[in-house]
Amino acid sequence: MKRREFIKLSASASALGLFPSEVGAALKLANTSFDCDVSNRKLVLIELKGGNDGLNTLIPYDNYGYYRDALRPDIHIPITNYSDLAVDISKQGTNQDLVFNPALLNGNNAGFKGLYQEGMLRMLQSVGYPSQNKSHFASIDLWATGNDGNGWQNGKTSGWMGRFMEEAYDSLLPSNYPVAIQLGSSNTWLGFHAEHEHGLALNIEGQNSENFYTVLSGLAGQPPANIPQNTHYGEELQHIIQTDAFANIYASSIESSYNAGTNLNNATDYPDSDLANQLKTVARLMRGGIETKIYMVTIGGFDTHNIQNQAAGDIDGRHTSLLNELSAAVDAFVADINSDSLGDDVVGLTFSEFGRKAKQNGNLGTDHGEIAPMFVFGKAVQGGISGQNVDLSEATSANNWQLKTVQHDYRQVFATLMQDFLGAANSVVDNAFFDHSKQVSFAENKVADLIKSSHYVEPGCYALNLPNIESKSLFLAYPNPVPDQLFVTSDFFDGIVDYQLFLLNGQLLRRGTLDMDKSFDSIELSSLPKGIFVIHVTNGVRTESRKLIKA
């Protein structure tokens, strides 16, 4: 089912006719016994680039002797303060004899260990996908596109996050802010590339507040009067024109939100690190009022083939420094967003393209592996552990010392957050990715108890759990983005029809008429400033709306 072939209806109005401020109110209609407004909720993705060594991140203390003596005699993590580092020394219920790397304990009751003790951190054991590819590039592409290594049935040229955003936030598109913002890497993540919508995400890495994009600036120039339709050239040209227009519009919203925002805890509470600065910017943008839904930040250097520990038996080294930076930055970020109600609407998580081998190599490091833990954090998260300690005995010379058993498919984790925290219907999850190997929806195979009951979205509140009807567009408006003159054509309307032009807040800017007896009519828009507008066209019986970008 192609998204553009359907219009999603609310109880009384087409979602295409809603302004962003009205979306939350529409969602509340689904179930009056529960506050269904999840329109302010956001995800923060933290990429641990390079392949994080999960075995030295969360140490399975139940088999510590084998881990230390047989697998990692030189780079094991010495445990001298077990009671401080143990996840839970009671080892009751789902708790296990699992130990945090000391780098995840930043000071007294701080860092990841502190968040866990406060019930705001959940650790997911053995995350991966069925047929692990141990190439950085291929594995990142698989994570980004929502595939499992057995094929590309979920798509090869679009990302699962892009597909999710264009489906889940359909009524907001196009918008005057990016639905996703990326920091920390100069390469825009493939996961944000949608099937139909362009410009959903903006990478602001390396940009300053006066100019949030440089690569495409001026590239489009004045769009050509005629863009070839149904050709590859025309599609690519339209993509460049739209991206250029979106970047200009997004720059204003990002800068104004950054200037209006604050970090409520003392700035010195954030450590002086690159990741902390990224997360500090995210918190400030959120508090400044931008309605961006997805943020992605990056910390690199986890490809620890050598000097993972600086010397035999010495915990200091590259991996310790990275985990310390990660833990301290996340702890400061959570403290910041929890200093007011912002924290109720934010969940963060870590991910890495793969783990490392169970057995050390000869360079005080580890080579490419398969599974690794994920951490999910925030006020809405039900703290604890999902899964069991890894079985070290499955890593042998016969399988090249790999830990292979996947306890959690990475898509399970994201599907759970999409539905239980963001309120996506099954169809939205399936549009992002589907388990083609097992022929089952991830909406039917979620991680249990990941979101607290106080923040859990009940099925009756699913934002897009709405009926669909097939519809043919009543009119076409082009080009979009429009530089000066907007052309309107229609196979449905004839004679004189009325049009109205609105700002996104509903303010009427202009009204007039169009003559549809001609092959087309046009509206001069050169006097309008750059931005996003809504045009309504009606013949008195049928009405339809379109969002327009003024370039």
Image: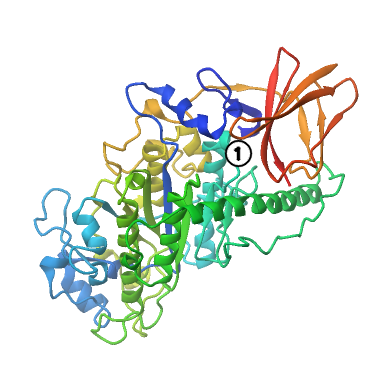
Q: State the image coordinates of residue 278 (x, y, percent, origin top left).
A: 45, 63
Residue lying furthest top in this view?
541
Residue 545 at x, y percent in the picture: 68, 27
Q: Is residue 143 left or right of residue 408?
A: right
Residue 35 drawn above or below residue 420: above
> Where 62 falls versus 24 (above or below)?
below
Instruction: Please say if 204 is above or below 455.
Output: below
Whether residue 18 sits left or right of residue 233 in the image: it is left
**Which residue is nearer to you in this view: 74 or 321?**
321
Q: Residues within 10 Å of mark 1 (few under 14, many from 20)?
A: many
| Nearest to the observer: residue 201 or residue 281 | 281
Query: What kind of residue is marked 1?
Result: Leu
Left/right of residue 166 with respect to residue 521 in the rendered view:
left
Q: Residue tagged by mark 1? A: 173
Residue 89 point in image, percent of width and height: 10, 59
Task: Judge by depth and name the residue closer to the eye, 287 or 234.
Answer: 287
- Residue 131, by quadrant, is bottom left
| Quadrant including the N terminus | top right
